[in-house]
Image (cartoon, helix red, strand yellow):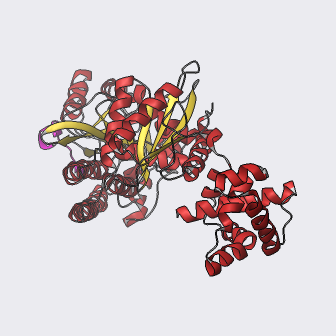
Amino acid sequence: MSEYVERSGTSEAGGPGGAPTGGVLTIADVLALPVLAAGRPEVVTGGAGLDRPVRWVHITELTDPASFLKGGELVLTTGMPLPQDTAGVRRYVDELADVGAAALVIELVRRYHRPPDALIQACRTRGLPLVTLAEDVNFLEVTQVVHTLILGNQTDAMRRTQRVHEAFTALTLRGSGPEEVVRAAAEMSGRTVVLENLVHQALICEPSGSTVDEALTGWEQRSRATPPGDHTQVSGPESWLVAPVAYQGERWGRVAMLPPPSGTPASAPAAFVPEDVTVLERTAMALTIARLIHATPWERTAHRSALRDLAEQRHHSPEDAHARLAALGLPTEGGLFLAVLADVRGKDDDSGPEARLSQELRTTGVPALVGTLAPGRLGVLLALRPSQPWRPVVERLSRVVLDLCPEAVVSVGPEVTLLSDAARSFRAAARVAEAALPGGPLPEGRTFHELSDIGLRHLLYALREDTRIQDYAERQLGRLIEHDARHGTDLLSTLRHYLDAAGNKTTTARLGALSRETVYQRLRTIERLLERDLESGEQRTELHVALTALDVLRLG
């Protein structure tokens, strides 16, 4: 079986004569055409170059055909003009190779019945694909079919290029952000597209045909091995297609289009085509414009997006989360992770505290992600060394927040050793924040809140919107409150003093500035109205919970 026959089975039919359409026409594609396949083509040399593009077909019976070529032509000949001597054959092949001919196709019907050894050796030396035809072929028909395909593909390519330009123009006109631009590039090309900054941090990754894990694992090292360029080009050991992204006339970063990962089905194109170059160039241009429109630094946007996905467990897998955060420069192995929340709802703009926290963390050298998780709520994920105490770090951050917003509440979740458990730390920190009493005193010796601070009052405050808590407080105390309102009494205060005094009537009298007899009388009235036994420790506890719930409900 010939080299070509083994390869040609993957060609897709679609154009005239069963040729593929919609892409660059290659030597393999041309050999698969029925008009050439009828000649029983066999690839004698250069089988590895069958993916070379064919720009045109040239029939020649001249001894110096190269003078009429411009490169990329499939040269068809009967072999009649080939020189007799070995030196002449080498010169003939050298001229074809020097001008960049795609391949030489020789018909073994009239002059030769097997290709000359000198021709085989010369083509092998120059890496020029040599194809023989065992049967007579109508060369004119070959040129008509191939040229029709080439011109048709060029028209299709122009249409596709026009659609790319129109799509990116629309994105720019509506002020699309970087995420939408990169997503559009991945969808148009069918390839993974990554935006990175100058320090090789992957800010946005839109995978296509792969996972975030496959695209970003070891990103910084792989990216540094891919040299930068001043224009769109294929670069580096992995053959990335890269284009620089500028901002205010200076290079800001670059956008990379990745080839399919190993193990991808063979139907996925490996080499980049001109349309990919167009897509990436327009992507870089749209990103440059988006950088001018959107004032928020993209690193901060990337941190926000990564934090939200982590806190809300929106990553497809733990491996994706590891790869994405590592590509942003956060250590993801061998340390401890801690979630910190700063509720700054009194601030009209969260960007000030967010930027200040980022600066503080850079100053201290603590690896972290900082971002707005929701309006009025900032999130911080600290990546600490196992032996590094976290309280001084959180205290420092908390003081920064309180200096900017004195009414802010800073809360912290528990330490976790796995990045996949960071969401649990964020949830715990959120529960602490929800339980912090507005205007309440700070914990002794620190300016932030943690789980151990949540007592009964804090718990009930966190649950204040639960109708069951509201119903419980009303059932326990409603009649007493109504009695006070109708009669102008203050039995509720007497009950509060009694419960605070743990049932000690003397202390109750002193707290309320009442006589003991008055206290006894009021307690009997309270028992009657509420149908409760105030000597019962359990019932006193129930009333104490109801009073505490009433207090936090009145806080709003």
- Residue 112: percent from left, percent from top: 36, 38
Q: Is residue 259 visible?
A: yes
Quarter of the rendering occupied by the N terminus: top right
| Residue located at (85% from left, 54% from top) | 537
State the residue in front, 113 or 59.
59
Q: For residue 17, which quarter of the picture? A: bottom left
Percent of width and height locating residue 104: 30, 40
Q: Residue at x 51, y 32 (%)?
A: 446
Residue at x 43%, y 59% (from the top left corner): 34
Which one is in front, 544 or 207? 544
Front-lying residue, 154 or 335? 335
Magenta stretch bounds = 55-69
From where the camera sits, is residue 265 visible?
A: no
Q: Is residue 395 above or below residue 456?
A: above
- Near-viewer residue (83 or 513): 513
Q: Along the horizontal axis of the image, is 539 left or right of 97? A: right
Q: Is residue 226 left or right of residue 373?
A: left
Residue 62 on the magenta segment: yes
Give above or below for 394 relative to 451: above
The image shows residue 257 at horizontal and vertical percentages of 36, 43
Residue 524 against residue 410 in the figure, above or below: below
Instruction: Tell me, yes or no, whether the highlighted magenta stretch contains residue 453.
Output: no
